[in-house]
Image: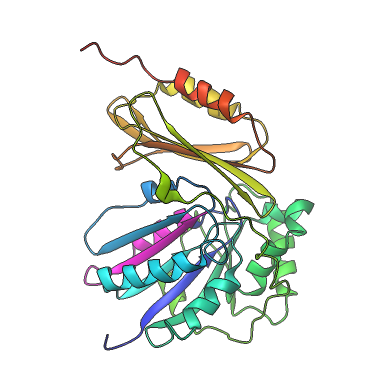
Amino acid sequence: MSKKIPTNIITGFLGVGKTTAINALLAQKPESERWAVLVNEFGQIGVDQAAMPNEEGLHIKELAGGCICCALGPMLRAGLASLIRTARPDRLIIEPTGLGHPEGIIDTLQGKSFRDILDLRAVICLLDPRLLDDPRVLSHETFQDQLNLADIVLLNKLDLATPEQVRQSHAALAGLFPPKQRIEEAERGRFPVELLDLVRDDTLAAQFPDSHVTEQTPEPLQTLALPEPGKPIRRTGSGADFVSCGWVFHRDDVFDYDRLESLLKGIEGAVRIKGAFRIGYVWLFYNRVLEEHSIDKLAWRRDSRVEIISRDARDWENLEQGLLACLEPAPMA
């Protein structure tokens, strides 16, 4: 390739709005450019790709089943090489899982395999100000290093935070050393695309560089078979003090909206729930962070799928039966 590919990492803890921010960036993509997005999910199924647009000049590759900085490290290198070769992008964006430590990804991008191909520019971290009120998040070493390794920190979900939480976040971020290049506020994930081209500060260092190597290696996604109608595929995983369980349903399975929403809202102890569901002739994306949830329409038509992340294992079999109970009766042959 004649020049290096501008590359950015968009990081941030679970539920801060990374996918929404990337979609807002994609809306600013020049029509003449090809962009590639590599999405990494902690869960086994992978749901974020369903929420991203499918359009000309955009290539999206998803790596599910763990963190690409450790458990999926070899898959990161292979996935990057395949995406670059296939898409030949003018820009590359990498979205790690919210539980992912950025250092391993940075090392890969600047290592001998990609240093002559990729130009790592600003690492951007999204922050929900309300997270600073949660001592479990504050003490999480990966959360701290996501901020330590970021060139730019974007305060997001400001409509849900109090003015005092926003003020305290600005004060805390201003006290970081080395200082950030930019501390900005994003409106529903939207920020100027020009921020992507700020130069990476290579002096930024992790405070807990070994915190991400303890993650367990989960079951590989390649073992997934195609589901049959009414017979979903289920996969579980664990690591970084969290557990996940995901299901993939056949595209002919149709969910009842009211029963499904009631079930998903009633799941206690879930840190994150994401799902793409067929509701009649419409497909919807369900996104829950702690007790807040939103629903949007989707262009996705491949299948229905849902992923649950929590700190402790749930009764997955009982939840599966609950999901099955949300299905509409199959039409008579």
Q: Residue at x 64, y 82 (%)?
A: 204
For residue 239, side relative to residue 55 (left or right): right
> In front: 249, or 165?
249
Percent from the top left, x then y, of residue 114? Answer: 42, 82
Is residue 245 something that shows in the picture? Answer: yes
Q: Residue at x 26, y 74 (%)?
A: 88
The part of the image, by quadrant, that contains residue 87 is bottom left
Q: Residue at x 43, y 46 (%)?
A: 47
Specify the quadrant that holds the N terminus.
bottom left
Percent from the top left, x then y, of residue 108? Answer: 50, 77
Residue that lies at the very extreme toward the front in this rendered image = 223
Is residue 286 something that shows in the picture? Answer: no
Q: How many marks?
A: 0
Q: Which residues are magenta?
A: 19-41
Percent from the top left, x then y, of residue 17? Answer: 52, 53
Above or below, 71 relative to 246: below
Answer whether residue 169 is magenta in the image: no
Answer whether residue 27 is magenta in the image: yes
The part of the image, by quadrant, that contains residue 151 is bottom right
Above or below, 263 relative to 333: below
For residue 239, side relative to residue 105 (left or right): right
In this picture the colour scheme is: rainbow
> In front: 203, or 30?
203
Specify the quadrant that holds the C terminus.
top left
> In front: 319, or 292?
319
Percent from the top left, x then y, of residue 55? Answer: 24, 56
